[in-house]
Image: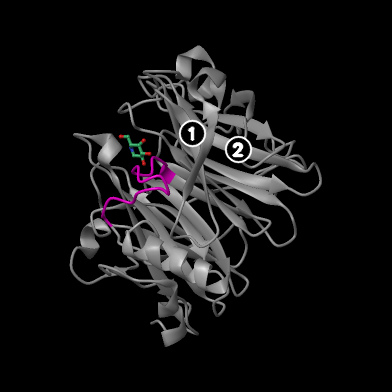
Amino acid sequence: MRFAIFFLFLDLVLAGNLRMEFAPGEVWPDTEGRPIQAHSAGILKHKGTWYWYGEDKTLGNFNRTGISVYSSKDLYNWKREAVALKKEDVPELFQDKGVCERAKVLYNRRTKKFVMWMHLDARNYAEASAGVAVSDTPTGPFRFVGHRRPVQYDFGYPEIDRTDQRTKGGTFRDMNLFLDDDGRAYVFYASEDNWTMYVVRLNAEFTGPEEPAVLGKTWARILVRQMREAPAPFKHAGRYYLITSGCTGWNPNRAGYAVAGSILGPWEDKGDPSVGPEAGTTFRSQSTFVLAAPGKRKGSFIFLADRWNPKQLADSRYVWLPFYIGKDGRVELKWRDRWDLSVFGKKLK
Ligand code: DGJ
């Protein structure tokens, strides 16, 4: 029996179906051999399985399919599970030529529900709203709950504002979710027409902002007037980290990161985490998520990013890179052609 399993494993490896390493920027097939379609990835670990949510761009730009979900036991091999949130499940304005981007999922231990947040937009990008959907299982189907802009705050509204923030609240575009050790959850999002990042604590169900929203108590304006997007938050040694990109559409740009002792700030700018060739474009990619490396020393993380291909969005690639935060608390991202999780054992630095 043991031999049979060994030879099956060997067969899979030799046939090239079983992956045992990451190859940033290369086509990443799922367990059926089809390129993974889950852009702007968000990862959730639940009961020993990782779930990868992302935009299915098989049919091109905009929301033509929905948010897909894949599962894995080892982070290398991913099985396509379903379209977790079908495009038909969001209001019509956000379907087809509308936008449903950067979906992320948290598990709420109290309600036992999986809660998905996403950026919803009309084709003109002027709706800029937060969508929320819930499910009893990680693979869905997710049930759409509603959409809104989480916070109304007079930041000095522009005279001409096609996004109508005075009436509707601050815009909601690139986003991420973060679950803190105390069970409280937060949404980070580019607001004020992308000029300023907001971090907003969620209600007990994770389905909306904690209310009433009080600046400095339940939410904060951070990276003020810095025009950042693609937020990827994480925590290490009691400190909060946030990697972001600049706002240049599908074109890659220089990443930056900030660190804070309290999630509502103050956040201190730490500059560009990338080093080496192509650091200035984050290795031709844009941040989407930071994942704790499984079973590795504290401080071991994986940076997840998208290498967009605007001419053929379905062929956009994934860039996953390892990093280790040492005593100095610095984040340093370096390019690697290929790597596996054993790099963390070799005192990655
Ligand atoms: C940059 C954002 O980070 C992406 O998610 C996407 O919305 C593109 N802009 C569209 O140009």
**Is mark 1 in CB contact (under 8 Å) with mark 2?**
yes
Tell whether position 31 is magenta: yes
Work out whether residue 158 can be spotted. yes
On the image, the x and y values in percent for residue 19 come to 38, 61
Give the percent coordinates (x, y) of residue 29: 35, 49
Residue positioned 54% across, 16% down in the render: 91
Q: Residue at point 45% right, 18% down?
A: 95
Q: Which residues are magenta?
A: 25-40
Is residue 347 in view from this perspective? Answer: no
| Amino acid carrying mark 1 in the image | Ile
Q: Amino acid at mark 2?
A: Met
Q: In the figure, is residue 2 to the left or right of 252? A: right
Give the image quarter of residue 294.
bottom right
Does the stretch in magenta take in 70? no
Say few, some or many: other residues with alpha carbon within 10 Å of mark 2 (under 14 / 14 to 19 / 20 or more): many
Q: Identify the element where label 1 is drawn.
A: strand
